Amino acid sequence: MGRYFIHLAYNGASYCGWQTQPELPTVQLTLEQALSTLLRQKVAVVGCGRTDTGVHASDFYAHFDAGEVETQQLVFKLNNILPPDIAIYDIFPVAQNAHARFDATARTYQYHVSQERLPFRQGQYCRIYYKPDIDLMNEAARVLMEYEDFTSFAKLHTQVKTNICHLSVAHWEESAGEYVFTIRSNRFLRNMVRSVTGTLLDVGRGKLTIEGLREIIEKKDRCAAGVSMPACGLFLTKVEYPYL
């Protein structure tokens, strides 16, 4: 048995997240069923993360174990039987102990919002009804970079050992009628990006001051932070490994 990495992307609008759940459509289940059919054996797939319901991934990795595989032929066949909202870019052999989730050294997410109606972007951004102050939001994003404990932005009652994250990028930019928030870290907490985005937008619309943001972070209380933004605007855009 060898280990293989899959490089893929998916539109999460039709799925209840990545991780398999009983009797619900998920990306993991869809991919496992397709692989099992083609390889004629039960295949378990391990993903690089657990995106929530409706969240998209333009860069995602997973691994599986199987006997000798003709990788490019498998890519072709998978893309022919998978739904059109999942695309397989590549499949390649890796070391037997390589792990799609635990070996990742950094992940980058982007969140998209716009004041405009974007008919060709439906399900891929969140519409807002005010003009945010992007300079103020970038000032707030720089404040985030000063901290490591993001308890205030973590979903409650999750089974994690620490809420420490090391951010390396956090900034907003305006592009093609959208405001895009980019954030990179060695790890993320459940729901963290969406709650951070909502809090920074509160700063951008004048509902929260920079000093107020600092107070929220230092309280380490999820109830103090802003609303969690809808899943539709969130994309996992890059996953990094030391050997790729």
Image (tube, rainbow, N blue to C red):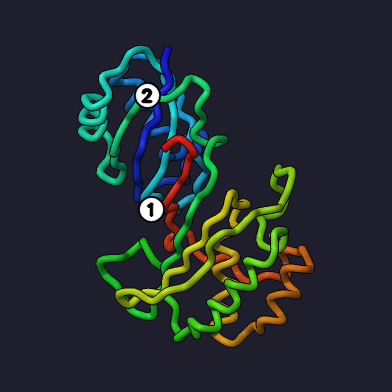
> Residue at the spot x=34%, y=74% of the render?
175
Q: Nearer the viewer, residue 142 or 123?
A: 142
Q: Quick check: can you spot residue 160?
A: yes
Rate crowding at label 2 as few (under 14), some (14 to 19) or many (20 or more) other CA atoms within 10 Å. some
> Residue at the spot x=58%, y=65% of the render?
228
Q: Secondary structure at mark 1?
A: helix
Q: Give the mark toward the camera: 2 or 1.
A: 2
Residue that badge 2 annotates: 93
Q: Amino acid at mark 2?
A: Pro
Rate crowding at label 1 as few (under 14), some (14 to 19) or many (20 or more) other CA atoms within 10 Å. some
Residue 18: x %, y % from top left: 47, 41
Q: Secondary structure at mark 2?
A: strand
From the viewer's perspective, tell me whether residue 178 is left or right of residue 197.
left
Residue that badge 1 annotates: 13
The residues bearing labels 2 and 1 have C-alpha atoms spaced at a distance of 30 Å
Q: Amino acid at mark 1?
A: Ala
> Residue at the spot x=30%, y=17% of the render?
69
